[in-house]
Image (cartoon, rainbow, N blue to C red):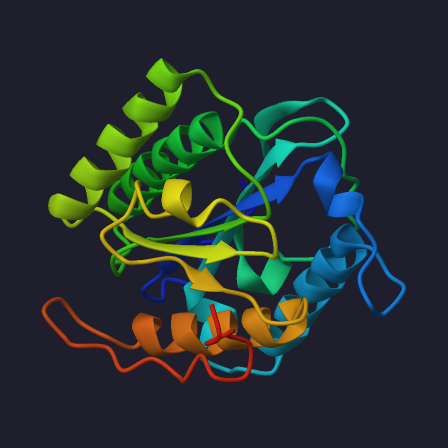
Amino acid sequence: MSTDYINNPNQRTPCVLILDISASMNEKTPTGRSRIQELSAGLASLQDALNEDSTAIVRVQLAIVSVGGPRDQAEVMMDWTDATHFHAFDLRADGLTPLGNGLRLGLDLIEHAKEDLKSSGVSYTRPWMMVISDGAPSDSQHEWNQAIHDCRRAEEENKVEIFSIGVDGADLSKMSEFSKRPPLILADMKFRELFVWLSASLSAASRSRAGDQVSLPSTDPWRNFGL
């Protein structure tokens, strides 16, 4: 972990990103760049947006779980990191899409974050989990069903807010199974706009208190309403 609760005791809003970096993310986009290049650029935009937000920079925590990639598995790519210490990095795409395993890893990370925050005496808002995928899960049906059950239960118990974002080609029927919130569609590889929205949304959430209704920014800059 790269967290500092002594010098920065501010309330935190944890957010784990579940990123599909399977082989299909190597597909070229109309810009001439691949999907994985656009996703990497989006992470850089997230870093910039957090740095420009005086609230988010001291209150947001991030973790990243990769799904697929050169090691062809779901794994923790970045443990919990305060926004002040977050540095974007390039991603490499390969392999299949064990999304169910990635979702369960994300839920485990969230529970670890809450335990760490509690033991440090730092308050926190409900954690977020943002899932980005351009395909269908390659897990066994049993593994996928377990992930659905765990995610739905975590939502019902108010342990997490889950947002799923489908990139062109994503299996939206599958992505609709693990959250009460319907998946949204990314328009034209607008990862930069998506991550700027995420930074602003986490900033808004980080200013809230238990029971508050948080007003999030519009998704219009990055969302495809035609599907």
* Residue plotted at (29% across, 22% down): 146
Image vertical order of residue 128 relative to residue 120, above or below: below
Residue 202, image quadrant: bottom left
Residue located farthest toward the front when viewing the structure as drawn: 227
* Residue plotted at (63% across, 57% down): 86
Residue 147 in the image: x percent, y percent? 33, 28
* Residue plotted at (61% across, 77% down): 193
Residue 10, image quadrant: bottom left
204 vs 130, nearest the viewer = 130
Image vertical order of residue 97 relative to residue 121, above or below: above
224 vs 149, nearest the viewer = 224
Query: Is residue 128 visible to the viewer in this orientation of the structure?
Result: yes
* Residue plotted at (67% across, 74% down): 48
Q: Left or right? Give the position of 107 relative to 130.
A: left
Residue 81 in the image: x percent, y percent? 54, 50
Query: Is residue 89 visible to the viewer in this orientation of the structure?
Result: no
78 vs 224, nearest the viewer = 224
Q: Left or right? Give the position of 106 relative to 69.
A: left
Residue 20 in the image: x percent, y percent? 60, 42
Image vertical order of residue 150 relative to residue 222, above or below: above
Residue located farthest toward the right when viewing the structure as drawn: 32
Residue 138 in the image: x percent, y percent? 53, 24
